[in-house]
Amino acid sequence: MPSYAESETNKAFIAQFPKNFIANAAYFIINMIIGILLVPYFISTLGIAAYGIIPLATSITGYVGYVIGSINSAVSRYLTVDLHKEDYVAANRTFNTAVFGLSAVILLMTPVTIIISYFIPRIFNIPVGQENDAILLFLGVFAAFMIRSWYGNFTVQLFAYNRLDYQNIVNIISILVQTGLIILLFKLYGPSLAFVGIAIMVGAISASFVALILSKRVCPHLKISIHSIDKSRLKDLSTMSWWSLVNNIGTVLFLQIDLVVVNLLFGATPTGQYAVALQVAVLLRSVVNTISGVLTPMTFTYYAKGQVNSLIKMMKSAVKLVGLLIAFPIGLLCGFAPQILTVWVGSQYVSLAPLVILMTLHLTINLAVIPLFSINVAYNKIRLPGMVTFLMGGLNVVLAISLPLVAGWGFYGVAAAGAIVLTLKNAIFTPWYASKVMGINALTFIEPVLPGIIVTIVLAMLCYLIGIFVPITSFMALLLIGSILGIVYLIFIWKFSLSMFERGLFSTYVPERLRRVII
């Protein structure tokens, strides 16, 4: 059995991994910095109540994104297999069936999104005097989702050829354009929710042009032609997309229902307060999605080439590495929650510290297993996960409403519902099903999650004790302590927690010169 670094498949991916990782890291850092800085900026310019409408709009329009994302997920799987087999006739059938099919879906959904946007002030609690701006915000965000979904047909090609660096160039352009335009419009005309919607839409339009150019450069074999539409391939894509949609609806009920419930039950201001704490969890998810995104093309390629043993070994290590990596920020967030909130958005929001802990602590389990999701897609075994996710998502909605109203937990009940149900699913079902799909021992992917759990708890307790004895009242103090802990943590993990294979997997993310230093 060839080693990880020796197989022919791995060599091609290893050459691209550093570029992908650097681009992913760049996008994550830019996204994180902008995400962190925009929260206090929006609160100071728009107010806490109006700020809460922005993530609410993203949450609602995200429902449309998940619907269309189901189609893109199916296309990614089939197109990757076709291209790696160099079957360009089949690849063109897949591509054009997706392009024209998705275009039809977007056209059908456009009037629905316009109607939803118009009635937004009647559905949700919107700050007085900002109803029309809220409508324009939702229209802009809906339009951006439609545009991103359509050009997703072209970024799929970048995914298939493992050019995630190009994918992230598209993402970086989108976020930089929309952020720059928000600040410019606020400076010229004053703060407005409408300007946020316009900026997000313009960012999506800018990114779409770049996506078209890069996809043509990477894969000139695919050409738009109505004659390449294949009814049999449409059936395959529709079947997979349907179960992916069921799974995504369940995901919506898990991850995108919080702000809706909080807004309807408690009003606009609590929605803004909840959104502050939720932003931390969103950033953590983006970390793991960045890492997992680099591994997903390799998962599909291993499957296409029948390299099952290599896939198992890689996935076990990926789950462990993600768990250990995410343990550090989660430990810091839970241990230093009051200090972080004080430095970030002000001492008046320190009372949200328990909410931050409640939202983030369980992620040490729920984010570690994210790399396993690509196994279900690669093997086209998404029916049962879709049904389970849908049912558990429904349970989450029931608990999210019941715990605040019946138990009197306020919006802490909404957060607790998500933590309970999501952990039940990902601690038990997700690793079990991935192993079942691959025909291996049921505990194969459960054991790699444990190191991250242990480390998270130890770090959180250590940071809490440090916070008692060391005053942390500035960003620089927080950065200094976090940096010292981070260096010690990385050395400890590298020396005592990783196997040679896991070090090799980690090193493939690193440019060659730096790799020589750390190995």
Image: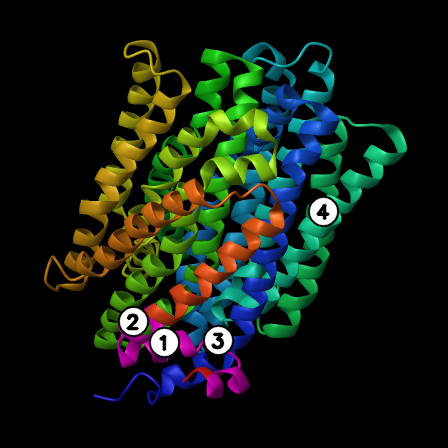
Disc 3 from disc 2: Cα separation: 14 Å
Label disc, if present, on residue 314 of the rendered structure: 2
First in sequence: mark 2 vs mark 1: 2
As measured in the structure, the alpha-carbon distance from the residue carrying label 1 to the one carrying label 3 is 10 Å
Q: Residue 220: tell me if it is visible.
A: no
Quarter where residue 126 is shown: top right
Q: Nearer the viewer, residue 75 or 61?
A: 61
Circle 3 is placed at which residue position? Answer: 17
Which disc, if any, is residue 505? 1
Please report contact status of discs 4 and 1: CB closer than 8 Å, yes or no: no
Q: Which residues are magenta?
A: 493-517
Q: Nearer the viewer, residue 439 or 134?
A: 134
Distance Cα–Cα, label 2 vs label 1? 8 Å
Of circles 4 and 1, the one toward us is: 1
- Sequence-wise, the earlier of marks 1 and 3 is 3
For the residues labelled 2 and 1, say whether their Cβ atoms are less than 8 Å apart: yes
Q: Which element type, helix, strand or loop, lies under badge 2?
A: helix
Quadrant position of the N terminus in the picture: bottom left
* Residue at image mark 4: 203
- Which label's residue is closer to the chain start, 2 or 4? 4
Q: Residue furthest left?
A: 441
Up/down of 115 relative to 246, above or below: above
321 versus 260 height, above or below = below
Quick one: SS at disc 3? helix
- For the point 65% across and 47% down, the residue is 34
What amino acid type should be assigned to the residue bearing mark 2? Met
Secondary element at image label 1: helix
